[in-house]
Image: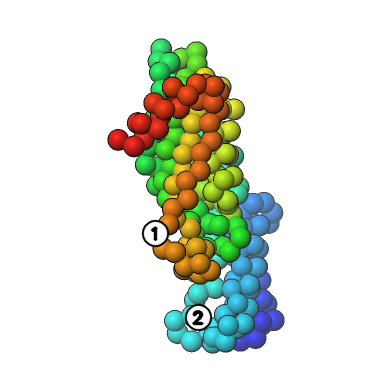
Amino acid sequence: MNNDAFVEKCYSELEDKITHSGMTTGFEVMQLIEQAKIREAVLMILEAIGEDPEREGLKDTPDRVARMYAEIFSGLAEDAGVYLECVFTEEHEEMIVVKDIPFYSTCEHHLVPFIGKAHVAYIPAGGKVTGLSKLARVVESIARRPQLQERLTREIADVIMKKLNPQGVAVVVEAEHLCMSMRGIKKPGSKTVTSAVRGLFRKSAKTRAEFLSLIKT
């Protein structure tokens, strides 16, 4: 099947889905349209590297990649701050740390994964505390975008600072980048570590030291 025929097939399937689902406008239709574009692009890549997109192992690959991209880049359609709107009052103004939060993100330079863990801490103010799982949700949401590790780290800290208005926030991210492990310099196992500190963590060396000691235990 040539490229034009494949695109026509994608949009024909789109029209059928719209007809049978009753959708005429809105985000659902846009999702289908964008997935059709991804399928087209993957087909072109397979052809460009000299593969046969019609062979058994690759026939459904454009579809699979389109569905995968809709999942791994779902954070683009989210405001990570919404996860921190669920708060409760607790008279606790000491450090809260959630460490070793696993995440998977995609390097925007080569569109290959970087994989690691995040350590997140904040010191509540005015008794404003959020659920522990919500911090992990923030990490996951921000990771599900084309990213740079430096930006990922900064955005996690900034969202928590903005939504909870705590005394301080600290974030450390450790990750292995497959763009370094499987291509280029080819150094598997090397880790990149980034940090972002806000409020009291920036002002107080003692507070930073406490955080770092806790994530190392």
The quadrant of the rendering that contains the C terminus is top left
Say which of 210 and 116 sits in front.
210
Asked if residue 179 is positioned above or below residue 159 in the image, the reply reads below
Label 2 to label 1, Cα distance in Å? Answer: 34 Å
Query: Is 10 on the left or on the right of 116, as rendered?
Result: right
For the point 42% across and 38% down, the residue is: 119
| Marks 2 and 1 close (CB-CB < 8 Å) | no
Secondary structure beneath disc 2?
A: loop
For the point 61% across and 86% down, the residue is: 1
Percent position (x, y) of residue 187? 44, 64
Say which of 100 and 34 sits in front.
100
Percent position (x, y) of residue 153? 53, 41
Percent position (x, y) of residue 143? 52, 48
For the point 44% across and 30% down, the residue is: 121
What numbered label is drawn on residue 189? 1
Percent position (x, y) of residue 55? 48, 87
Answer yes or no: is residue 213 visible. Answer: yes
Q: Residue furthest left?
A: 217
Of callouts 2 and 1, the N-terminal one: 2
Say which of 65 and 172 sits in front.
172
**Disc 1 residue type?**
Gly
- Per the image, the residue denoted by label 2 is 59
**Disc 2 residue type?**
Lys
Query: Is 97 on the left or on the right of 152, as rendered?
Result: left
Quadrant in which residue 158 is drawn:
top right
For the point 67% across and 51% down, the residue is: 26
Classify mark 1: residues with Cα within 10 Å, few (<14), some (14-19) or many (20+).
few
